Amino acid sequence: MPSQHPRPLLNHRTAAASAVLSSQEAIQPSRRPQPLSVAVTKLVIQEFFVVFGASYLASAIYHEAIAKELPSSHLYIAADLFLAAAVEAIALGFGHYKNSQSQSRHAFLFSGFGAVALAFSFLLSALFLFKITELYSRATFVFQFITVGFAVLAARAFWQPRLQSAIAAGLVNARRVVLVGDAIDRAEFASRLKATAIETVGSFPLPLRQDQNGDADPPEHAERELRRLIDGCRRLKPDDILILAKQDGLSRLNGLVCALSEVPAGLHVVLVDAVACLATARIVEFGNTVTMQVLRPPLSQLQQAAKRVFDVFVAAVGLVVLAPLLALVAIAIKLDSSGPVLFRQTRHGYNNETIKVFKFRSMTRLEDGDDFVQAVRNDSRVTRVGAILRRTNIDELPQLINVLRGEMSIVGPRPHATAHNKMFEGKISVFSRRHVVKPGITGWAQVNGCRGATETLEQMQRRVEHDLYYIDNWSFWLDLRIMVMTLFSKSAYTNAY
């Protein structure tokens, strides 16, 4: 499984690495790892037999247990072969094995289950069209679907981390690239690509350069350098060519792209000066033009509506089911110390708007606004009951009311106090991007241990990185995973004081 955290910014490599890479025109690998296509072919064949075996085994077990006889071999074997072939055709057709070195496990598993569901729908259509539904047991069909679904999920859960480990170890070669750019940039990107098992097989300087006085190279020299680059790329036969462009070289980019279009390889342009900004960019049609969309709304209108329905349902059910617990907590707070049971604290919500967040009172003082001070370990302000509430996250349960009011979501970046936001929004450039979705009662940062006091800039940076990962990779599966981790993961209770 790939890392669930955002990739850090590029690190500067040692001068030695830069010197070595800049002095090489072509980098020949010391060994030839297995191509990714071969590894994927093996996985496809193995998954084919898993689907076939699970499907036939399910039909045999059901007929033996219910009908006391084996199923019609010719009909069910034909159906099992059809299912296995359909699942693999769908997997390959929808690119389930693309970007195997960085694909998340939940996405890989979910796509496998989707392939099984689609394959069974094809089988049902075929049975109907050929008018043989009477010969095929409906109960067997359902049992096969459940069995094959679990078999594919188990097989992919077993194979995917092993494939990624083999890629990371250099045993499987995901892609072969040639880098074109300045020496330092080539060294940095070669190291970055190596982390995802993309092999840099060639490294070339940018042609059509200018000298230190700003004068362009002579035409014949520029043409010679360009031809040398094209011939080198043809000889190395890369899968992709990456042009590492900088702002001062954009004017010459069109000619270089046209020249390299002669090479049968994918051609990519990386704007080195804006790598972080373009991390989530994509090319889209906008009216009658094409734009580079740097960011997009994290949730579509349909997804927002679905998430809102889910939030209202969970919040309403939660308030009803937890009503006895909430009442006991209220009584305990009143008996433990003087003051209100609930208090409302000003925090920033969706679109940076201020909201009043409900909490069970866990301290002797009710701090808000600029007077807010984060709780620390052994904080004297925390009451005896409050310490228990904070360690178990029960003090956050009244925020189910905020969810019903539409101010919060069940899952999302945790809302910070306004004073806390003012402290960091000027120090972390993307800090306020946390507010492009509704804040949540629990979030990806919290279940990964990024909670409690943020006494250093690095601690807040780590929390923000997790929040942005959630925003950029939102799915219902991720929301459900975070909810389960909130209940059962130890890391969700780290630094709870």
Image (cartoon, rainbow, N blue to C red):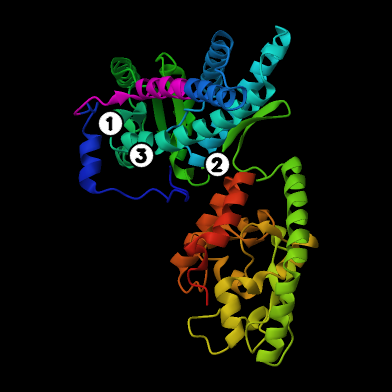
Residue 131 in the image, given as x and y percentages of width and height:
73, 8
Residue 290 in the image, given as x and y percentages of width and height:
64, 28
Q: Is residue 400 above or below residue 385?
A: above
Q: Earlier in the sequence, mark 3 or mark 2?
A: 3
Q: Confirm whether the magenta stretch covers residue 2.
A: no
The local crowd at label 2, few if under 14, some if 14 to 19, many if 20 or more residues have their Cα within 10 Å, is few
Q: Amino acid at mark 2?
A: Thr
Q: Is residue 73 above or below residue 222?
A: above
Q: Earlier in the sequence, mark 2 or mark 1?
A: 1
Residue furthest out toward the front: 68
Residue annotated with mark 1: 171
Residue annotated with mark 2: 280
Residue annotated with mark 3: 189
Q: Which residues are magenta?
A: 30-50
Residue 152 in the image, given as x and y percentages of width and height:
50, 30
Which quarter of the rendering shows the N terminus? top left
Tell me how far mark 3 sits from mark 2, CA to CA: 17 Å
The prevailing secondary structure element of the residues shown in magenta is helix
Give the residue drawn at x 19%, y 29%.
Answer: 30
Q: Is residue 219 left or right of residue 341?
A: left
Depth check, front residue: 179 or 117: 117
Of badges 2 and 1, the one in the foreground is 1
Q: Are marks 2 and 1 in contact (CB under 8 Å)?
A: no
